[in-house]
């Protein structure tokens, strides 16, 4: 299979072309129009799906996908909650779901992964990073918020982020669980005393964009990360198992 890395097909037209079993990763397909196409088995996974529209046969399916995921993951709808009570309830729900997945994963699958995707252990390390970024960095404004065990996202170096603060040797699963549990307690403790006034306060985006999120926005990002990566892990564990 040939690879086109960095290729630009913007505005191109493909007629009677075959993309059967092709793989697109970290690519921009926004605004693509497909007519008279065979989409049997087409598999789309986009974290940003809910920020726009996806039209299938004239129907925007984004609200339908959102509703179905909420059905599959009870409590997921609370990732958009605007009150302290709603955010606390959402946090309890997603942590219970994660506990079920972690305890139910056989030891031999903790470091196993589907091609190009993170394992369970790596995903938990990334969630440590997400908590550090949005709670410790964004909300609490700690100058050096990151734990060395965190796993940073693809492209962080290109954004100018110093990745040398993170360990390169894979930690033991027990160590990952210990740091993860510590970060979970931090979120629980923060939400226990959060008020509507605090949630409305503005903060800086810990990743340096022009967005000025509120404290509530930062918590909602944490919840979105938790639910999204839970779905990824369960999807991949089902394939591996």
Image (spheres, rainbow, N blue to C red):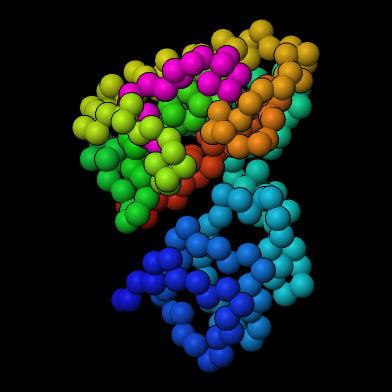
**Relative to residue 161, is residue 92 drawn left or right?**
right
Q: Can residue 171 be seen at all in this image of the molecule?
A: yes
Tell me residue 150's x, y (percent): 37, 29
Where residue 99 sits, quadrant-wise, is: top left
Judged from this view, the residue extending furthest toward the top is 193
Residue found 54% across the figure and 33% down from its top: 207
In the image: residue 120, left or right of residue 61:
left
Which residue is painted at 47% across and 42% down in the image? 159
Look at 66% across and 23% down and name the residue there: 203
Magenta highlight: main SS: loop
Where in the figure is residue 179, as x and y percent of width and height? 37, 19
Left or right of 52 in this view: 5: left
Q: Nearer the viewer, residue 63 or 239?
A: 63
Q: Quadrant of the N terminus?
A: bottom left
Residue 144 counted in the magenta span: yes
Residue reaching furthest front? 160
Give the magenta part as a residue range.
137-152
């Amino acid at each position: 299979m040939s690879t086109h890395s960095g290729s630009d097909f913007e505005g191109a037209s493909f007629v009677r072309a075959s993309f059967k079993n092709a793989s697109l990763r970290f690519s921009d397909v926004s605004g693509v129009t497909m007519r008279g196409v065979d989409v049997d088995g087409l598999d789309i996974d986009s974290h940003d799906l809910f920020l726009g529209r996806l039209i299938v046969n004239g129907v925007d399916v984004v609200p339908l996908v959102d509703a179905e995921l909420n059905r599959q993951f009870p409590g997921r709808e609370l990732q958009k909650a605007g009150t302290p009570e709603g955010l606390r309830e959402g946090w309890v729900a997603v942590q219970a779901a994660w506990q079920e997945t972690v305890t139910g994963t056989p030891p031999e699958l903790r470091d196993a992964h589907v091609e190009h995707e993170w394992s369970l252990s790596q995903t938990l390390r990334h969630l440590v990073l997400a908590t550090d970024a949005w709670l410790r960095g964004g909300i609490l404004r700690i100058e050096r918020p990151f734990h060395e065990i965190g796993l940073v996202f693809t492209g962080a170096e290109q954004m100018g982020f110093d990745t040398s603060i993170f360990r390169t040797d894979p930690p033991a699963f027990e160590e990952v669980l210990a740091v993860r549990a510590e970060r979970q307690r931090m979120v629980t403790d923060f939400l226990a005393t959060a008020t509507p006034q605090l949630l409305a306060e503005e903060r800086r985006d810990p990743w340096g964009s022009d967005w000025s999120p509120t404290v509530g926005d930062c918590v909602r990002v944490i919840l979105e990360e938790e639910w999204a990566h839970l779905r990824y892990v369960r999807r991949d564990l089902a394939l591996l198992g």
